[in-house]
Amino acid sequence: METVKIVVTGPFNAGKTEFISSISEIEVVSTERRITDGSRAVKRETTVAMDFGRITVDDGLILHLFGTPGQTRFNFMWDILSEGMLGFVVLVDSARPETFREAKTLLDRFRRYSATPYVIAANKQDMADAWPPEDLRIALRASSATKVLSCVATNHASVKEVLLDLLYSILESARGD
Amino acid sequence: MALKGNLKDFNVTQLFNLINLAHKTGSLTVEERGRRAEVCFKAGKLVYASLNGQDDGLIGVLEKAGKISPEQSRVIRARSKTNADKELGLLLINAGYVTQDDIVRSVRSHTLDVVYLLFTWSDGSFRFEPNKLPAEGAITVPIKLENIIMEGSRRVKEYEMLQDELPDLDMALRFTERPDARLHDINLTVEEWRVISFINPRNTIRQIAKANSIGDFQIRRIVYGLLSAGLVELIMPEGPKMVPDASEAASAPPPVKRSLILRLIDRVKRM
């Protein structure tokens, strides 16, 4: 049985747990802990270790979905999770410009992993204050080659589209066989 | 849909960059400690700016620019029967008080004064209303944003902000492929031109700074300006591969077979 991995990352409260929950065939394994710092006002619990979801492709292949910690003090987890991944989704809360700087910092860091395909998912597009994906592209200084996709992480169809877009990007960079 | 936020999170330079690159039309309102500025844009160009508490009418603008005297200002105000600046401007030109060029230059100067003041605001709420333009009758002067963004970035004094915006000096730069981003339309300092002349996918920002004997703060400020004006973009440097920090070391992506990805795509499609 072969397993492959896709990582979902993004700033605090961007919707990573919801994203994985919407597409995983198992209930997401989430190591949530009470927040003990200033982030309390936004969310009572946040991911301090990781989320884990699974999609069984066929008898010989399983896709694992990992959500990285949302706060910068857990950056060390990224190095563990990113090992051997096919690609990653950078999830951004489009309605909270105060998180764009953190998202941009993450993206700047990810440019070091340029060999790994990724897409940016502009989450919470169902909210009135959401910045459109094209504005988010400029705000995050993402290049025109980077896919910035509209997303509602609580919606199965929307998450599926983001995942497919990422898989098409991975396909473009995949070696033939 | 209006774009809302706080300057603490998304500053004026970033807002202007967004409006410039997206060729936006609309009105940006910024409020900071009782002050309120409204700046209007058409197809990505600045066209109008006003600040509460200031006399933004044409008479006030011309008086501030020294084109009419306070006495003339008082007389014109007393006799004027219109509030529309365009109409008033025509009357003043016809009466020989000012020329059309005086009006354009004065309005432009006033608009830039308001905008450069905005660059000093680091806290405050903003709201961008798409397609909202100044009131009918207001005089608008289109001004390209690249020069304003460059000037705004030259005034940046906070090192921490520059470090946030440009954390990695080991990245390289390349010119963007925007057809409207033309360097010859932009006023650059000698130091900025020096940096420009070294832009090449093989040169890291750090190497450019070293070659030009430019300090860390100054190179960040220059590159931040060029990035914000949409003239350049960050890329991984070409040539010998850099060794990332131990904390950032990532394993190379595994060799992926197309057939495996096609199986994944097929499965996700069926979900």
Image (cartoon, coloured by chain):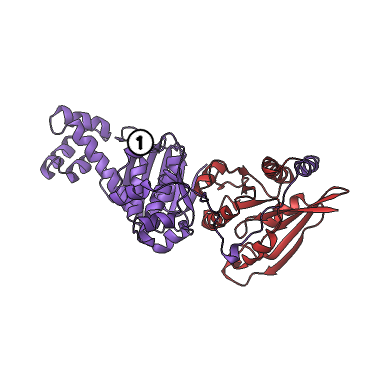
Chain colours: A red, B purple
B205 and A103: which is toward the camera: B205
Query: In the image as oriented, which residue stretches furthest toward the top?
Result: B94
> Does the rendering let one see residue A27?
yes
Q: At 77% from the left edge and 56% from the top edge, which residue is drawn? A: A53
Give the labeled residue for mark 1: B135
Q: How many marks?
A: 1
A60 and B101: which is toward the camera: A60
Q: Give the crowd class for mark 1: few <14, some 14-19, many >=20 residues within 10 Å.
A: few
Left or right: where B270 falls relative to B44: right
Query: In the image as oriented, which residue stretches furthest toward the front?
Result: B240
Where in the figure is residue A32, as x and y percent of width and height?
A: 71, 66
- What chain does badge 1 belong to? B
Where in the figure is residue A117, as x and y percent of width and height?
A: 64, 47
Q: At 33% from the left edge and 53% from the top edge, which residue is drawn? A: B154
Q: Which amino acid, by three-letter code, is at mark 1? A: Ala
Query: In the image as oriented, which residue stretches furthest toward the right?
Result: A59
Tell me where residue B139 sits by quadrant.
Answer: top left
**SS for callout 1:** loop
Tell me where residue A81 sits by quadrant.
Answer: bottom right
